[in-house]
Amino acid sequence: MHVRAADGDFVIAVIDLPPSLAAVLEPELPGLADEIMAAIAAEVPAYARPLEGTFGRGLRAGVEEALRQFLEQMRDPAAGRETEVYRTLGRGEWREGRSLDALLAAYRVGARVAWRRLARAGTAAGVEPETMNLLAESIFAYIDELSAESVEGYAQAQALAAGERQRRRQRLLELLLTDPTAPATTRRRAAADAEWSLPARAAVVAVMGNAAQLAGRMGPDALGGTVDDSACVVMPDPEGPGRAAILTAALRDRRAAISPATTLQGLPDAFRWARAALELRDTGPPLVRVDDHLAALALHGDPALVARLRSRRLAPLVDLPERTRARLSETLAAWLDERGNAVAVAARLHVHPQTVRYRLAQLRERFGGALEDADARFELMLALRSGGREATLGA
C-alpha cells in the first residue's frame, strides 16, 4: 500500500509498521551502511574497484540517505522523501557509459543486506513475526521505488544527450548545405561536435515528410533534418555498394529527389538541385534523380546546373585537343540543328559532306547511343548552346 506525500512523491508502504520499531532499528544504521558498501564491492563486478571518489561518495550518500528516510517514514508515513540523489546516480551511470544493470544490482544487494541485519535486530528485540514480515515487504518495495528513480534519472540523461546531439547535427547540416565557403577546419570541428564522420563525397536527398525518420532508417551515417523549411538528408557515399537499395528501402514509396554525388563544397548546389527536382512533377517513380532531369532543371535558370549538364553531356569530348574538340562540338551542334542531314551540315559549315561524315563517325564512337536518344539529343543541344566554362560537379 502506498500513500502520496503533499509534494506529490510516493512514500513507502510502512504505515502498518509501528513507529516504535524505528527506535529498535536505528542503532544498526551506521554499521549497516558500511556492510552494504562492502557487499556491493564484493558482489557487483562493475563496482569491484574501490568505491571512492565522486562515484563512491555519491553511492554511499545514497545508501545512508535511503536508510535514514526509511526510518523517517516509519515514524511518519506521510513524510515526503528526497529522490534527487537516486536520479543523480542514474544520470552518473549514463555519463560513465554503463547500463543500469550494475546500479540496480547494487540496490538489490543493499536490500538483502539491510533485511538480514535489521531482521536480526528486530528478532533480538522480540518484534512480532507478523511485523517482521511487513518490514521485509517494506524494504523491498522501497528499493523498487529507489530503483525507479534511478531509471528516470538515467532516461533523463539519455534524452538530454540525444537532444544536444541532434541540435549539433542540425547545426552541422545547415553548415554543410548553406555555406560553401566554410573553412574545412570549421566543418571538421562541427562534425566532431556532432559525432558525425565527414565523407569525401555525398549526395543530398530532399524528401516529403520527416527527414530525421528517413535518416534513421538509412543508418547512422545519414544526416537528416530541416534546412530552409525543406526536409533533407545528407547521404555519404551514395554510389557505394548497396547504397541505392538502402535508400529505396528507407523511402518506402515516399516521394524524394536525390542529387548527384559531390564533394562537401558542392553540397549547397546539390541541396538546391534536389529541392528543385522534388518539385518537378507529382507523377512517375517516387525517387527522382537530378541527373535524369538536368534539362528540365536547367530551364529553371540555375547556372550551376547548366555547368553540370555541360559536364555530363559533353564529357566524351573532354580528352580531345582543343581544336579537335571545337570542330566536333561545332559539327555536333549543326547536326542536331539540321536533324541529322549531313549535306545540310556540310553546307552550313562550308566543308565537304565526306568531312561531315568522318566527324559524325567520330562523334558516334564517342557518344554511342546517346545520339539516337531524343532526351539525350535535347540535353546535348542545351549543353552546346549554353556556352561558358565546362565546369564539373565535385571534380
Image (cartoon, rainbow, N blue to C red):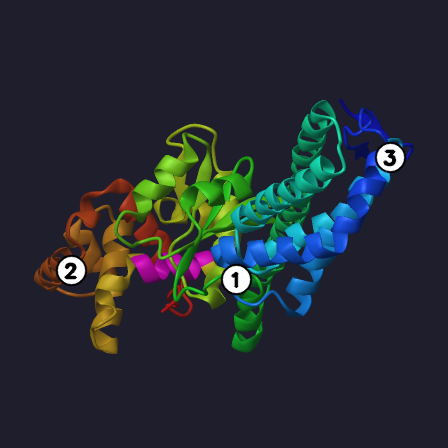
Q: Which residue corresponds to the image point at 29% horizontal and 50% vertical from the top-left?
A: 337
Whole-angstrom CA distance, mark 1 to mark 2, is 45 Å
* Position of 143 relative to 204 (above/below): above
Which residue is the site of mark 3?
20
Residue 141 vs 332, above or below: the answer is above
Q: Which residues are magenta?
A: 305-312
Marks 3/1: CA distance? 57 Å
Q: Residue 150 in magenta?
A: no
Say left or right for 299 vs 2. Answer: left
Residue type indicated by callout 2: Arg
Question: Which of pointers 3 and 1 lies earlier in the amino acid sequence?
Answer: 3
Prevailing SS of the magenta stretch? helix
Find disc 2 in the rendering and name its residue. 366
Kindly tell me whether residue 386 is visible in this rendering. no
Q: Give the distance between the C-alpha atoms of the residues marked 2 and 3, in whole angstroms.
A: 99 Å
Tag 2 or tag 1, which sits nearer the N-term? 1
Where residue 34 appears, as percent x and y from the top left, is: 67, 58
Q: Which residue is mark 1?
A: 195
The C terminus is located in which quarter?
Answer: bottom left
Position of residue 52 measured from the top left corner of the image (x, y, whole percent): 63, 68
Determine crowd level at label 1: few under 14, some 14-19, many 20+ residues with C-alpha closer than 10 A.
some
Helix, strand or loop at disc 2?
A: helix
Give whichever of 372, 18 is nearer the camera: 18
Q: Front-most of 121 and 323? A: 121
Foreground: disc 3 or disc 1? 3
Q: Identify the amino acid type marked 1.
A: Glu
- Mark number for residue 252? none
Magenta stretch encompasses residue 308:
yes
Counting from the top left corner in percent of width and height, residue 339 is at 23, 46
